[in-house]
Amino acid sequence: MQINDKSNYQKYHPNNKRYEEMTYNRSGKSGVLLPSISLGLWHNFGKYDLQANAEAILRTAFDNGITHFDLANNYGPPFGSAEANFGMLYKQNFEAYRDELFIATKAGYDMWEGPYGNFGSRKYLISSLDQSLKRMNLDYVDVFYHHRPDPDTPLEETAIALHDIVRQGKALYVGISNYEAEGIVEMSTLLRELKVPFIIEQAKYSMFDRSIEKTILPTIIKQNLGCIAFSPLAQGMLTNKYIDGIPTDSRAAKGKTYLEVNEVEEKLPIIKALNAIAQNRGQKLHQMAISWLLHQKGITSVLVGASSSSQLIDNLSATKNTEFSSEELTQINKLTSKFL
C-alpha cells in the first residue's frame, strides 16, 4: 500500500450529518454506545490492497455514522499491515476526530516467532498492544480484546494483564473474543474484582452459525456485557453470490477464507429459500442476514467487512428494516434451526 501523492491529496471533511441516521446501542450496562454496524478491517486493508480504496471505505464509514473500527494485531496480510495502513490513513484523515472514534484491536493469535508471540500471557498481550499502538499512531485504543482463550496460561494472568493495560492508559475498556460461556463468566468475575471496565464479547454469529444462542449469548446478557457479532454473512454464503452457482472468482472456488465448495453446495437450497424471504421483505439476502442479527436480543453491533464504499452503503441499509413478522421469524427459524 503506497502513500498518496500529497500534491493531489484532498483533505477530508466529514459529512456534517453523519450522526443523523445511525442507531447506537449500549454495550451491556456500560457507558459505551456502539453503532449498529461496525467496520472490520480483517480484509482489504493489508499490504497488497489499494490504499485509495481502503481510504474511501473508512471515509464512507465515518460519513455514515460508523464510529467503531475493529482491528487485530495479525490482520493483513502480512501480520500487522492492516494496523500500519490504518495508522497512516488515520493520520491523514481522522486524527482531528479521535474523540469521535471507538477503535479496537486484539491479541491472541499467532503474531511473531518464538514463545512470546501467541495466546494470552502477560508478556504477549502487553508487548503486542505496544506494537499495535505504534503501528496505528495512537496513544490508546478504546477497547482491547483478548482474541481467544489460552488453554495453558492461567486466566488470572490474562485478566491481570488486561487490568494493567487499562491502568497504564493504553486502553479505555477491555473485551474478549471466541470465549465459551464458562470462560466468559470466569473472566467477568476476575475483571469485576479487579474493577476493570469489561464491556463486550465478540462472537461468531449468523443464520448459518447460531450456536451462541444456546449458552454464550444468554451468558453475555446475564453478565451485563455487550455482544458484537462477526462473520454475519457466513463468509459470503448469506449473499446473492452463490444463488446461481459458484463463481470462479469467489472465496469458495479459490478455497480461501475457510469456505469450501461442498459447504456452499449443501446449503444452496436454504440460501435460495432465505433469499425468497428477503425479496418479500424488499431486501437483498445479505441485508436481511444483518437485519436478523440486529433483531436478536443482546446484539449490540454487527461487524461487517467491505471491499468497496458501495458495498458498505449497501450493508448499511440493513439498519432501516430490522423488524420481522412472526411468520418471517418462523420461516427463518425452520430453515436455520439445524445450525443452533
Image (cartoon, helix red, strand yellow):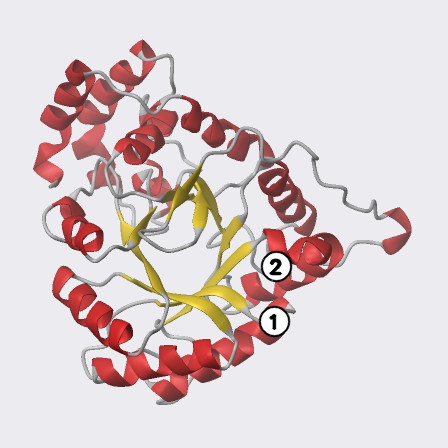
State the residue in front, 284 or 257: 284
Q: Are marks 2 and 1 in contact (CB under 8 Å)?
A: yes
Q: Is residue 119 above or below residue 48?
A: below
Residue 189 in view here: yes
Which residue bears the numbered disc 1?
Answer: 135
Kind of residue at badge 1: Arg
Relative image position of residue 196 (x, y in whole percent): 35, 72
* Local crowd size for mark 2, using a 10 Å CA cut-off: few (<14), some (14–19), many (≥20): many
Q: How many marks?
A: 2
C-alpha span from label 2 to label 1: 8 Å
Q: In screen coordinates, is 194 left or right of 8?
A: left
Q: Which residue is mark 2?
A: 86
Disc 1 packing (10 Å; few <14; some 14–19; many ≥20)? some
Of residues 236 and 333, the one drawn nearer to the viewer in this rendering: 333
- In the image, residue 296 sits, relative to residue 226, either above or below, namely above
Drawn side of residue 74 relative to residue 30, left or right: right
Determine whether, in the image, residue 72 is placed left or right of residue 87.
left
At x 50%, y 41%, the residue is 306
User: Which residue: 54% across, 30% down?
Assistant: 313
